[in-house]
Amino acid sequence: MEESVYALRGATTVSHDSPAEVDEAVGELMRKLYSENGITDSDVAFILFSQTRDIRTRNAAAACRSSGFGTLTPLFCVQEAEIAGGLPFAIRTLVLVNHKKEREARMVYLRGAASLRPEYNKGEEK
């Protein structure tokens, strides 16, 4: 198969704002995104994170690196737009991949973020 450039989406939540919880949630999200899509850091061109305003103790990009992901990759984190009724304590990611696409890209929505895209969580525990 030819190399493909494509994007993976994912999101997760934390129950409260603490560095340890952000590290745990981001690590879990990245492990699942990488394993579900058969990728490694060398396949990733760029990772963008957004996090809601209520997460202030830890930057999701820093949490990604501390979890062992993104070591070869430019990372960036922004504050998510405040939308009335939006999901609180949310962390989202967009991973740009340059890799031989062997199957359809698998998006990952964990914890409270599973409600954002239920079509990606069929048959999985939430």
Image (cartoon, helix red, strand yellow):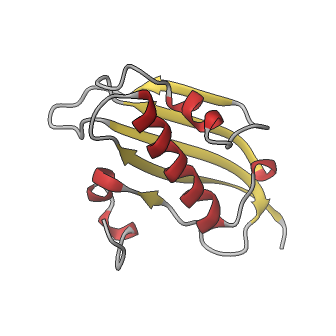
Residue shown at 54% from the left, 46% from the top: 27
Q: Nearer the viewer, residue 3 or 37?
A: 37
Q: Residue furthest front?
A: 20
Query: Horizontally, is 81 left or right of 9 in the view?
Result: left
x, y percentage for residue 22? 43, 35
Q: Residue at x 44, y 28 (%)?
A: 19
- Quadrant location of the C terminus in the rendered image: bottom left
Q: Nearer the viewer, residue 74 or 124?
A: 124
| Residue 82, image x, y percentages | 26, 26
Drawn side of residue 101 relative to residue 20, left or right: right
Using the image, determine if residue 92 lies above or below residue 121.
above
Direction from residue 36 to residue 3 in the image, left or right: right
Most extreme residue toward the right is 2
Residue at 42 percent across and 48 percent down: it is: 11
- Residue 125, image x, y percentages: 33, 71
Outermost residue, left side: 85
Farthest residue, direction top? 56
Q: How many marks?
A: 0
Task: Tell me the quarter of the image containing the N terminus.
Answer: bottom right
Residue under the image location 59 percent in, 67 percent down: 36
Name the quadrant containing residue 67: top right
Q: Position of residue 115 (x, y in %)?
A: 26, 57
